[in-house]
Image: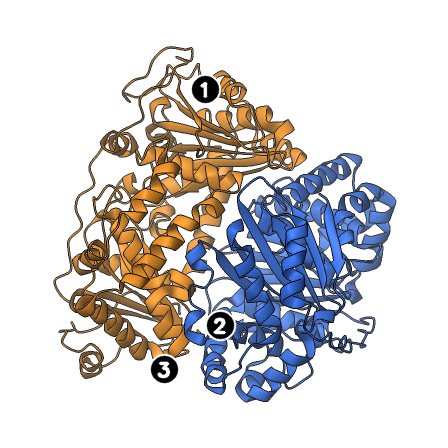
Amino acid sequence: MTVRETVLDNGLKVLVQEVHTAPLASVWCWYRVGSKDEAPGVTGVSHWVEHMNFKGTRNIPRDQVKGIIEKFGGAWNGYTWIDQTTYLETASADALDRMLFIEAERMDACLYDPADCESERTVIISELQGGENDPEQLLDTEVTAAAFKVHPYHHPTIGWLSDLRTMTREDLYGHYRRYYVPANATLVVVGDVESDDVLKRVESKFGGFAPGSPPARVTQTEPDQQAERRVVLRKAGTTAYWKAVYHAPAFADEAFFPMLVADAVLNGAAGLNIWSMGGVSRPQRSARLYRALVDGGLASTVSGALMPTDHPYLYSISASVAEGKTLAAVEDVVLQEIERLRRGGITPAEFAKVKAQLRARFVYDADSVTDIAHQLGFFETIGSWRAYHGIRERLDAVTPEQVHAAVQRYFTPENRTIGWFEPK
Amino acid sequence: MGLDPLRVVLGNGVTVIVKANHTTPAVSIVAGVGHGGYTDPPGKEGAAALCARVLDRGTVSRTAEAIADDLDGRGASLTVAVGRHQMSVSATCLAEDFQAVLALVADVARHPLFPEAEIVTRRADLITTIRQEEDNPASMAVDAFFSALYGAHPYSRKVRGTVASVEPLKRQDLVRCHQKGFQPSGLTMVVVGDVDEQSAVDVVSRAFGDWAATAPAGQAGGDRPAGGDKPFLSAEAARAKAEGLSIPDAPRATERNLVAVPMMNKSQADVAYGFVGIRRSDPDYMATAVMNNALGQYAIGGRLGDSIRERQGMAYYVFSALDAGFGEGPLYIRAGVSAGNVERTIASIDAELTAVLTDGFTAKEIDESKGYLVGSLPRQLETNRAIAAFLLNAEVFGLGLDYDVRLPDLIRAVTLEAANAAARRLLDPARATIAVAGPWHPPTLEVAQASSGETSPKRPSAAEAGPS
């Protein structure tokens, strides 16, 4: 678990962890920019920029992008979310130099050909519309927007359709130049590598870039919510979906792990890796909401999500209503269970159970070089990679009293937004 | 050196495959049987799917609640999956819980109780899932595609069944499904993770060794493990073990067929376009897999991705998939596009396939796909779960214990000519079956003709009504 941290003179932070269990290396380049850094009118620009950064650079002609890492058996990908944008390659460790070259080009030399920008506009609109085909995603977008009035967590990462139609190549390129600078980036290399060798290669490829200045940061704070909000979406469909979100602590807040324990009591432990989540199914059959809703026949699925974020985000509970049952019945039961948690707290047996679950999840969350590298970089974008190494300690330190205090504070009616998707 | 797992066949026919991997203090367990939705009796489609959902909801000695408490208390996960020809019980746990969780997997596989109350609840869940799919253009396009492509062949049926077929299922249907599927000689137990290989075999022996066959299933036998290795299954024997029946060849389309599932409440349409494919045991399998990679997988969707996503900007996803199993699953292309681009997308697929048929792939394309498929193996065999899935697949298809070692050379041996021949064997726009689900109405005959060149399209017909 030894991580070697180095900061180049231009501000690029480099994290290297040697893992010699397989002949693989994973390279991730992280930027502290996500949809929360977007102003009205250019929502979705971070995600669109991510797409543009796969389209050729000064030294990787457009027609040579295809296969640049695949021919080494590698895979590449990227994602944009509310706090971060990231790019990765995982391939044979022999391809380390090639992976670093791609990331250096991406940071400094992307082309933003106007025709490519236009062609990608429709790809992204297709991505948005594909998401809209899913009623749960539609509901999520509406509920999140209702929960945030001031903070830019209000808008979806993919952006509003109206902005995607009007944004220009200059908007995209300006965003790229502003945020894609060494001082705003972290490069993570994990795998069958020698750290001295990695650093030498990184210095030669990235060391010459001008540092850039760390971009201005979001200053808006979401005011305390004063009253319950409701969203009712009535559209053609076959299934009803219920969702509630509560304003929740940021990852660095001392209430975060107590709330993670509370979520595990309600829904089973989900872990803290947003990249691999879903790889191992959640242990939720003895959890309170599963027993009340799914075993109770009211819902076919229920889940909860507390995401590790930079600023205070949302704790969400989502359920698909069982055929023939009602949204009102699901809502009654969830709110009763929340009230039971607030009044009665959790039992010692539950407390021991969910702590064991979370410890196991933290092991499953890091079972490949790709996932280890993801975790280091992800937590660096919302604080520090050292905070990732501290998750076990923070979990162990949680007391039942802290869980009780957190649920008292966050699970109040005025702190929530409830959404219904009602098929018509 | 390869994975080199330990493989032992117990006296009663249970096959045990263990691979130690000490990367993390965790273990993945998969118990697979060669029985799935394919053998659901007519009118009882979905019986295997419901059996899978209730299988782990109570055994002769443990209530559903006790199983849930045991698993959740350890942070272990347990899932039961079902396909056309297979069912599997999979678990992931910490190494310290391996023995207890394996014993639980064995109990679930051997002694499920199928309590009536659980059947009621899980049937309602399954029906809700089916109804959700009816509102999902991707699911509806694929369902309509299978239905149109396979016609009277059993592959046209959905493993999940329909609301009408799932509603009347009885406990006896699930008991029968379990009895047919879970027999010692048909069970393969794969364990990968932070274990000692021989000790893990002993743990499996204790959990399964005293299990005697309850139905004629071949080599049911003694109550103690035989110990030694037995020869690996041949592909033919594996197929017989999987089903005990032969799967008929699927009828080949003789003309082009377009079906539409209008779902006017949706933002985007899903297209499924393809052909009857091949069996996993087909001598052309590897050439077809390489061809499929070049056609619709390599980088962002191979040739199809170059055209439809990269050059024309029409879709966020476009890819091809080869579903080669015990029977002739399809080779099909999928894309999500706006309603206004459906015809253009279909025409682009036609054009790309025609170009492949006329000029073939380039040597560079095939070399790159081969390089990718060979080079990606270490990455695909990194986690316990992925290794367990690979080993189970190798066992059920009779590919050999050393398949991971032989596979790179099998891929490298595919020639450009073989890949092009595989394309010519399967791809033909004039005989394509196409399904479109989403906010799109079928075009007029003239439009269809214009978009498909020399083909002779059949009059479009609505497959199934969209949601009201």
| Helix, strand or loop at mark 2 | loop
Q: Colour of chain A?
A: blue
Residue A60, numbered circle? 2
Q: Is residue A253 left or right of residue B32?
A: right
Where does the image place residue B133, in percent across and percent down from the top left?
42, 59
Which three-letter amino acid code belongs to the residue tagged 3?
Gly
Of discs 3 and 2, which sits in the foreground? 2
Residue B340, numbered circle? 3
Q: Are marks 1 and 2 on the same chain?
A: no
Q: Are marks 1 and 3 on the same chain?
A: yes
Q: Chain of mark 2?
A: A
Task: Pick the quarter of the image with the N terminus of chain B.
Answer: top left
Residue B208, numbered circle? 1
Of pointers 1 and 3, the one earlier in the residue sequence: 1
Which three-letter amino acid code belongs to the residue tagged 1?
Phe
| Residue A97 vs residue B195, the one in the foreground | A97
| Residue B409 vs residue B351, the one in the foreground | B409
Q: Colour of chain B?
A: orange
Q: Residue at x 19, y 69 (%)?
A: B359
Residue B65, compared with residue B454, is above or below; it is above
Q: CA distance from mark 1 to mark 3?
A: 57 Å
| Residue A196 vs residue B176, the one in the foreground | A196
Q: Chain of mark 3?
A: B
Residue B426, compared with residue B70, is above or below; it is below
Q: Residue at x 58, y 66 (%)?
A: A103
Q: Chain of mark 1?
A: B
Where does the image place residue B80, in percent across and percent down from the top left?
47, 39
Q: Given contact means CB atoms under 8 Å apart, are the residues at marks 1 and 3 in contact?
A: no
Residue B395, compared with residue B323, is above or below; it is above
